[in-house]
Image (cartoon, helix red, strand yellow):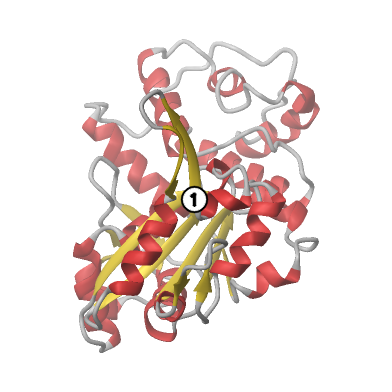
Amino acid sequence: MNTWKIYPLDQYDLAGSYDLVELQSPPGLTNMIVPKRTIDLLFTALFITGNNCHLHGSSGSGKTTLVQCLTQVPENIPPLCEAYGIEEFRVQCFSFPITAVETSAELYRLRSISPERGTYYEDSELWQWLTWVDEQEDGAEVYVAHIRELFRGQEAVEHALLDIISDGPLTAPDGRVLRRCGKRIRWVADSNMGVTSALVNQADNAILRRFPVQRHIEPTPHAERVILERLLEAEQLHYIPKHLESMLMLGARIREMQQRDGRFLSITPGIPLYLAIMKIAGQQSTMDFPDLLLHTLFGASSDEQEHLPAMFEEAFGQRKAKAALLPVGEDLL
């Protein structure tokens, strides 16, 4: 049974598995509120047992931010280490989007052209990092490689990653060998739910075996509400719109239909869009809220508007909404 209790990280031990825990986010981002069971799985896998992890979910679900919270925000690590009874460590993280790699050779070396040097080759950032990890002395560091947008890259590139994501020595095409980094690095990947749901059962099992821990990341409605309230307060909009719950419920239903039926894949409900909707609603009290949603949240769903009347009726009570002609004139606040 889910609860709505939110615990700060220094009270991690008091939280139950279905409670929410607040992680400090990278600078410029609102703190992330995550179910404790999600942190339990990822922290144990990455930092205690050394298992690679794959996070999948819809766009805007917080996959990348969650990885950043656990690998690039040092303040989150000490209280978690204390809660798990392990020695404190430092995380050295390298992050790269697989979509930026066009050929498998570019995982190792890049070709460049300049007027002064002509055509020349230099090591990729990934290979430079792997070489650096291979040379480090043993210590309190944990090395994490974060692959962004797995399954969106070139098939040949993703298969070439198999030669890199291993526990053994790593041999480059030019014969150079790295003997230590394979056993040192923990890999974490994220992918879009729309892509994963279509490919995860068809993907090469060799790729999936490299990521034994699979975790679906989905926004928690109550956490979304808390974050939105904080952002609205920061915008000096000191109110809670009565349709906020309806909007969050619609977002949850959209994600459910994306995962179950493959509908509304072009819609990305999330905090930035919700905040924009709330800011408009706060300044435009004469606009009907479902009509506002039609041109914001559902702005990319023109081919699927036949499904909207039932969803609006569910979210807004006994409203008999029509997709083509929505009712107008309701007060918002």
- On screen, residue 116 versus residue 107, left or right, reads left
Asked whether the viewer can see residue 37, the reply is no
Most distant residue in the front direction: 117
Residue pictured at 59% horizontal, 18% vertical: 295
* 19 left or right, relative to 142: right
Which residue is painted at 50% across and 79% down in the image? 169
Q: Quadrant of residue 311?
A: top right
Q: Nearer the viewer, residue 304 or 185?
A: 185
Q: Residue at x 29, y 58 (%)?
A: 72
Q: Is residue 242 above or below residue 70?
A: above
**Snapshot quadrant of residue 162:** bottom right
Residue 270 makes an appearance in the image = yes
Find numbered disc 1 in the image and state the secondary structure of the residue it sits on: strand
Front position in the image: 11 or 288: 11
Q: Which residue is mark 1?
A: 109
- Count of numbered marks: 1
User: In the figure, is residue 130 to the left or right of 25?
Assistant: right
Residue extending farthest to the bottom is 85
Relative image position of residue 145 (x, y in whole percent): 43, 63
Q: Residue at x 41, y 12 (%)?
A: 284
Q: Position of residue 282 (x, y in %)?
A: 36, 20
Crowd rating for badge 1 (residues with CA inside 10 Å; few <14, some 14–19, many 20+): some
Residue 108 position within the rendered picture, expressed as x and y whole percent measured from the top left: 50, 55
Give above or below for 317 relative to 210: above
Q: Quadrant of the C terminus?
A: top left
Residue 39: percent from left, percent from top? 40, 70
Question: Does residue 281 lie above or below 119 as drawn?
Answer: above
The amino acid type, in three-letter code, at marker 1 is Arg
